[in-house]
Protein backbone atom coordinates (compact mmCIF):
# COMPACT_ATOMS: atom_id res chain seq x y z
CA UNK A 1 0.00 0.00 0.00
CA UNK A 2 1.06 3.57 -0.61
CA UNK A 3 -0.34 7.09 -0.26
CA UNK A 4 -0.58 9.61 -3.11
CA UNK A 5 -0.95 13.25 -2.09
CA UNK A 6 -2.18 15.70 -4.69
CA UNK A 7 -2.11 19.47 -4.67
CA UNK A 8 -4.84 20.24 -7.16
CA UNK A 9 -5.84 23.54 -8.73
CA UNK A 10 -9.60 22.96 -9.04
CA UNK A 11 -12.29 20.53 -7.95
CA UNK A 12 -12.26 18.96 -11.41
CA UNK A 13 -8.69 17.75 -10.90
CA UNK A 14 -9.97 15.14 -8.47
CA UNK A 15 -12.22 13.67 -11.14
CA UNK A 16 -9.24 13.43 -13.50
CA UNK A 17 -7.18 11.71 -10.84
CA UNK A 18 -9.90 9.09 -10.47
CA UNK A 19 -9.23 8.11 -14.08
CA UNK A 20 -5.44 7.77 -13.81
CA UNK A 21 -5.12 6.12 -10.39
CA UNK A 22 -5.24 2.31 -10.12
CA UNK A 23 -8.62 0.67 -9.53
CA UNK A 24 -7.77 -0.47 -6.03
CA UNK A 25 -7.29 3.06 -4.65
CA UNK A 26 -9.16 4.65 -1.75
CA UNK A 27 -9.64 8.34 -2.61
CA UNK A 28 -10.13 10.82 0.25
CA UNK A 29 -11.32 14.41 -0.27
CA UNK A 30 -12.53 17.35 1.79
CA UNK A 31 -16.23 17.25 2.65
CA UNK A 32 -16.86 20.60 0.99
CA UNK A 33 -16.60 18.90 -2.42
CA UNK A 34 -19.71 16.87 -1.63
CA UNK A 35 -21.82 20.04 -1.86
CA UNK A 36 -20.53 21.25 -5.24
CA UNK A 37 -23.45 20.09 -7.38
CA UNK A 38 -22.59 17.66 -10.16
CA UNK A 39 -18.95 17.44 -9.04
CA UNK A 40 -20.03 16.37 -5.56
CA UNK A 41 -22.43 13.76 -6.91
CA UNK A 42 -19.74 12.38 -9.24
CA UNK A 43 -17.26 12.18 -6.35
CA UNK A 44 -19.81 10.43 -4.13
CA UNK A 45 -20.70 7.95 -6.88
CA UNK A 46 -16.98 7.39 -7.47
CA UNK A 47 -16.59 6.10 -3.91
CA UNK A 48 -14.60 8.99 -2.50
CA UNK A 49 -14.33 9.08 1.30
CA UNK A 50 -15.09 12.59 2.53
CA UNK A 51 -13.46 14.11 5.62
CA UNK A 52 -14.61 17.18 7.54
CA UNK A 53 -11.46 19.23 8.05
CA UNK A 54 -13.18 21.45 10.60
CA UNK A 55 -13.70 18.46 12.91
CA UNK A 56 -10.14 17.30 13.33
CA UNK A 57 -10.91 14.29 15.53
CA UNK A 58 -13.55 13.02 13.10
CA UNK A 59 -11.19 13.49 10.15
CA UNK A 60 -8.41 11.61 11.92
CA UNK A 61 -10.72 8.72 12.80
CA UNK A 62 -12.00 8.47 9.20
CA UNK A 63 -8.43 8.46 7.87
CA UNK A 64 -7.38 5.87 10.48
CA UNK A 65 -10.27 3.64 9.44
CA UNK A 66 -9.31 4.08 5.78
CA UNK A 67 -5.69 3.21 6.62
CA UNK A 68 -6.83 0.05 8.43
CA UNK A 69 -8.94 -0.93 5.40
CA UNK A 70 -6.01 -0.22 3.07
CA UNK A 71 -3.75 -2.54 5.03
CA UNK A 72 -6.28 -5.33 5.54
CA UNK A 73 -7.49 -5.36 1.92
CA UNK A 74 -4.12 -4.52 0.31
CA UNK A 75 -5.34 -1.40 -1.49
CA UNK A 76 -3.61 1.95 -1.98
Image (tube, rainbow, N blue to C red):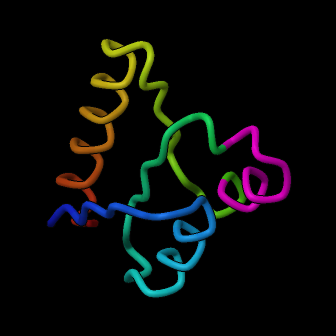
Left or right: 60 as drawn, with respect to 32: left
Residue 50 against residue 18 in the figure, above or below: above
Between residues 72 and 67, which one lies in front from this camera angle? 67
Residue 66 against residue 18 in the figure, above or below: above
Q: Quadrant of the N terminus?
A: bottom left
Q: Is residue 39 magenta?
A: yes
Picture quadrant of residue 33? top right
Residue 44 in percent (x, y) is at: 68, 52
Residue 5 in percent (x, y) is at: 25, 60
Between residues 43 and 6, which one lies in front from this camera angle? 6
Left or right: 71 as drawn, with respect to 48: left
Give the residue displayed 43% in from the left and 58% down from the top: 27
Give the residue displayed 19% in from the left and 61% down from the top: 3
Q: Quadrant of the C terminus?
A: bottom left
Left or right: 43 as drawn, with respect to 19: right
Residue 13 in percent (x, y) is at: 53, 71
Residue 15 against residue 32 in the figure, above or below: below
Residue 49 against residue 21 in the figure, above or below: above
Q: Is residue 36 magenta?
A: yes
**Which residue in the rendered view is the most extreme toward the bottom?**
20
Between residues 35 and 1, which one lies in front from this camera angle? 35
Q: Which residues are magenta?
A: 34-43
Between residues 66 and 56, which one lies in front from this camera angle? 56
Give the residue displayed 76% in from the left and 46% down from the top: 36
Left or right: 68 as drawn, with respect to 52: left
Figure label count: 0
Amino acid sequence: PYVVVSNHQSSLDLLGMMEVLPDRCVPIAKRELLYMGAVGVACWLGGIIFIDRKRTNDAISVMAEAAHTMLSQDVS
